[in-house]
Amino acid sequence: MPVTSNAERKTLILTGASRGIGHATVKRFASAGWRVITCSRQPFPENCPWEMGPEDHIQVDLSDPEDTRRAIAEMRRRLEAQGSRLNALVNNAGISPKVPGGSRLGTIETSLEDWQTVFQVNFFAPIMLARGLIEELERAKGAVVNVTSIAGSRVHPFAGAAYATSKAALAALTREMAHDFGPRGIRVNAISPGEIDTSILSPGTDKIVREQIPLRRLGEPEEVAKAIYFLCTEQSSYVNGAELHINGGQHV
């Protein structure tokens, strides 16, 4: 395999990388030789299973706009080694508060503070990151992938109202961004996962699988990661403003 210089190596910035879809996405891009810069509320773990080090991790509280701005400045600094180029930004971080016992929070029960926090993480942080990194994305003719959810298009038995509406808003934001970022050579798309086999599954998911998913199985995080990779590479060079459903047919 030819040696790739640091300046030529493609770079991904990924939020929500610690588990599930994010973890699988790290592995998919790293296996293709990409540099992956991860972002999460937690510090870099000493027992991290990936080859990257603390220099490729940024601790950030995306519910805090000021801390998000600080993190963007740090991202830009770390991208200087790549000629201030960013090939892909994946907005995967998301939160969904629940009542004790794991039941969903509806529109009546959700506090204003929870509404604001959920929208800051799930909706405002993605556009803050994309706008803050637009110059680096433009230099690389890069791609943005927003992770929405099937809960954004229907009332879901487990996902709360704030989460669902924030994901619906993120889907609309993806279209707006595709229109505005496209002339700069930046593609913006979304993936909308359904029931994926991760640690956040709720009891009763098996009933959804039996009754609502034509393929009659859960999706695997690796299947979502492959779709994200597709949307960040030349294989999807004319795909812009799309929302790709990854749910085994649950949306039909």
Image (tube, rainbow, N blue to C red):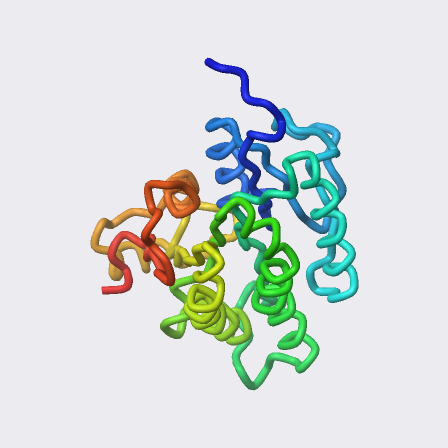
With 55 as the anchor, is 100 left or right in this view?
Answer: left
Q: Which part of the image, by quadrant, shows the C terminus?
A: bottom left
Q: Position of residue 18 (x, y in %)?
A: 61, 43
Residue drawn 63% across and 25% down?
A: 51
Q: Is residue 158 visible?
A: no
With 170 as the anchor, is 128 left or right in this view?
Answer: right
With 144 as the anchor, is 155 left or right in this view?
Answer: left
Q: Position of residue 144 (x, y in %)?
A: 49, 54
Q: Position of residue 63 (x, y in %)?
A: 70, 64
Occupied quadrant, residue 85 = top right
How many discs appear? 0
Residue drawn 48% across and 73% down?
A: 169
Residue drawn 49% across and 48% down?
A: 142
Residue drawn 61% across and 30% down?
A: 7
- Establish if 222 lies above or below 98: above
With 182 as the anchor, is 49 left or right in this view?
Answer: right
